[in-house]
Amino acid sequence: MSKQDDTVDTATGWARRNIAEARSRLGGAQGEGDGWVSRHVPGGPKTLWILLAIVLVVLFVWWLLPGKAKTSQRGMGGPQPVGVALVQRGPLDVTLNALGTVTPLATVSVRPQVSGQIIRFSFKEGQMVKAGDVLAEIDPRTFEAAVTQAQGQLARDNAQLADARIQLARQRALMAANATSRQTLDTQAATVKQLEGTVLSDSANVKSAQVNLGYTHVTSPVAGRAGIRTVDVGNFVSAGQTTAIVVVTQLEPISVLFTVPEDSVHAVLERYNTGDDMQVEAYDRGQTVKLATGRLTAIDTQVDTTTGTVKMRAMFANDDGELFPNQFVNVRLLVNTLQNQVIVPSAAVQRGASGTFVFVVKADHTVAMRVIKLGPQQGDHQAVISGLNPGETVVTDGADRLRDGSEVTVPSGQKVTDVKGSETVGSGLSDKEKAERRAKMIAACGADIKKYCADAKGRELMMCMRENRDSLSETCQAELKKMRRSGGGAGGPPRGGPGGP
């Protein structure tokens, strides 16, 4: 029996003995004691039993609490369960997040070009139409009559022109025989030219009448979706009216206009000017669903001084119609892809008085607080420039209860091993990769090094190449840009200069 059980039994016996002694002192006999209790204690024996029950409950609770406290103390002193993840090496996308608006390349308000009564519609509201498709028809009878009248005028004037030309030929024959005057010949020649002008004018009138007749078939100038029409069959429409019959919006392809901070423009331009396609992704308002993937096609020529941003346009095929005109979207612009980065989950990064740090789990299941230097972040992935090695295990959940040297337990099935190497090895390249990069740089820039930096070595060579980067050959500049885009952290090239240690 435990110590708490002995204590409870002792307290219970003590309560019972006190009740018996009270009864014996007040009369000895059971009946007399009960009578005295009934007379002098409010509620009688019932009250005593209630008090006894309360005492027992209090003792029972007192017996439970120490056990719980001890259990809690045992838990605080033991290993802490944590969530962990492996430090990995791989590529990391560098992106810019922006707010954008879906903007159609063409939004056309279809208005009538001639006046008349609408007799037919050839589309349904919301229907996809092609360029040149007939949307509506206006009563053509008046315009057909105008075409016939113009053609008749043209035929009459053509006949007069033919007669004048015959008369001109006769006058020339008579003139050759000296049977007519020069004035008569010249007058006839002028009549022919006058009638030729009349016929030309009549031909234009015929074409104009035919154009007006064609306008009775209201067509779509672009391919897109037809909206809700504003008039019905039987309505009279006029040429030049402000109200459109229907609005047609081009949806395939479609663009998204977005803005980026002016501080990020140079990084975007550096990649954009190489001619490489820059991927742009459009997400919904909650940034949870990717709507479409496109490419950057245009960068504005100036900074908006009111917002300090630069406007850009991205094009999307929009074959599935996920992007809707004037829709608000979140844009992610892929600026660069850094290779050979040391990557940890963002949840593993902690912040404190010493800066950013992580808890590294050792093989003996103790943790060590490791100060790190952060690089770019993409979603839940965080690049680490220095402080970690690939293959190490870091704490991702439960770090708020840890201290340097704390014991931990990891989920079953996950092995923890110690990784040898410098703790300051960050997202740089291995020695072999650095040597390969240096060999490529020397092969591409050997002539430039001899010309501009023959006596420079090590860091002085880097600085010299950076100072003369505008004078380097195209082959050398292309290789340096390729090295910068590949990243490499501590082993990567400086901006504008060659890489390598």
Image (cartoon, rainbow, N blue to C red):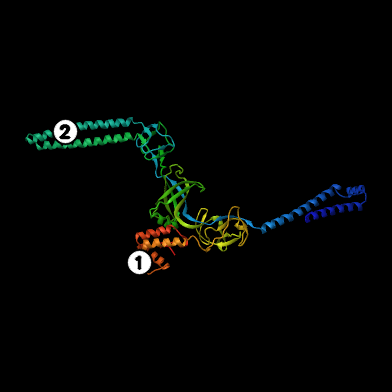
Q: Residue at x 32, y 31 (%)?
A: 142
Distance in Å between CA atoms under marks 2 and 1: 88 Å
* Residue situated in front as seen by the camera: 297 or 465: 465
Q: Residue at x 90, y 48 (%)?
A: 34
SS for dot 2: helix
Name the image quarter holding residue 78: bottom right
Q: Which mark is on residue 164? A: 2
Q: Residues within 10 Å of mark 1 (few under 14, many from 20)?
A: few
Is residue 495 visible in this depiction of the protein? Answer: no
Location of the N terminus by quadrant is bottom right
Location of the C terminus by quadrant is bottom left
Q: Position of residue 257 (x, y in %)?
A: 43, 49
Name the kind of residue labelled 2 in the image: Ala
Residue located beneath label 1 in the image: 450
Q: How many marks?
A: 2
Is residue 480 visible in this depiction of the protein? Answer: yes
Q: Is residue 72 left or right of residue 113?
A: right
